[in-house]
Image (cartoon, rainbow, N blue to C red):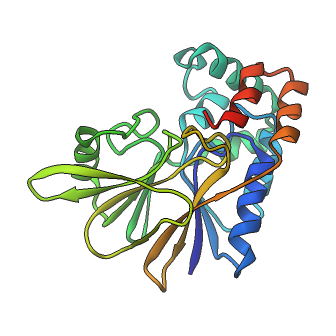
Amino acid sequence: MRIAILSDVHSNLAALQAVLRQAEAAAAIDGVWCLGDIVGYGAEPAETIAELRLRPLTAVSGNHDLAAIGAIDAEEFNPVAAEAALWTAEQLSDDERAFLGALPPTLGVGSFTLVHGSLRAPAWEYLLDAEAADAHFALQTTPYGLIGHSHLQFWAEEREGRDATFHRAGDGTRLGLGKGRLIINPGSVGQPRDGDPRVGYVLYDEAAATVIWHRVAYDIAATQKKILAAGLPDFLAERLAMGR
């Protein structure tokens, strides 16, 4: 089984399509696991939802997905994110709203637990330090946790009696599974924030018991034009080229 694990697509259709093309180039993938924030920020929420639904999809909700259907108040976001959330809400059909509304906050799939932020605060927490990782591990009942939200590629390793350790990942980083409990972040498809504007995701190979982080380029300029044409804040277009 080969699974594309991705997060924070944020209505960036071109970025999502670049991921799927690369993931399927060597061999067919058996599904997509999405860790939330399918929509928000970008200009193509409906098209992004449709693209994901073309394949076997397992997904959890993110804070932007919840804001787009009114399940959380957009006032909890910064002004730019709030404006994008309100715009996104106006673009969705009843079917698309129902799809987002049916996404669970957490989900167990075999040896993996999927969540957007953390098991302590599924929609909101940025899991970026040992305290947050240890709190998450205390709630994680599977060997491996999959998280998004921070738009960064890394993994955290549980250590008995000591603080969890963090490891940065990059294009081609390969991690073998089976040696201990882990938290894995594939990075962001739609809006990377580590200074590299290329799309980030992870490919899980069950037979090889590995996950591999990847980066792939896409047409940023065309995506920027769509954001600006939609009347969304300029910053949402500008940041794509900076990877911030």
Vertical comparison of 16 with 20: above or below: above
Where is residue 162 drawn, in percent x and y? 12, 51
Q: Residue at x 31, y 67 (%)?
A: 143
Give the residue at the far bottom of this rendering: 207
* Whether residue 229 is visible: yes
In this rendered view, identify the residue nearer to me: 14 or 114. 14
Where is residue 211 drawn, in percent x and y? 48, 70
Vertical comparison of 151 with 55: above or below: above
Give the residue at the far left of this rendering: 161
Horizontal side of 114 relative to 179 (left or right) equals: right
Horizontal side of 119 relative to 80 (left or right) equals: left
**Which quadrant would the N terminus be assigned to in this image?**
bottom right
**Which quadrant would the C terminus be assigned to in this image?**
top right
Q: Residue at x 43, y 52 (%)?
A: 154
The number of numbered badges drawn on the structure is 0
Where is residue 6 drawn, in percent x and y? 59, 56
Q: Residue at x 66, y 51 (%)?
A: 199
* Whether residue 55 is visible: no
Q: Quadrant of residue 74?
A: top right
Horizontal side of 94 relative to 101 (left or right) equals: right
In this rendered view, identify the residue nearer to me: 145 or 184. 184
Q: Quadrant of residue 145?
A: bottom left
Vertical comparison of 142 with 219: above or below: below
Q: Residue at x 64, y 22 (%)?
A: 81
Horizontal side of 19 relative to 163 (left or right) equals: right
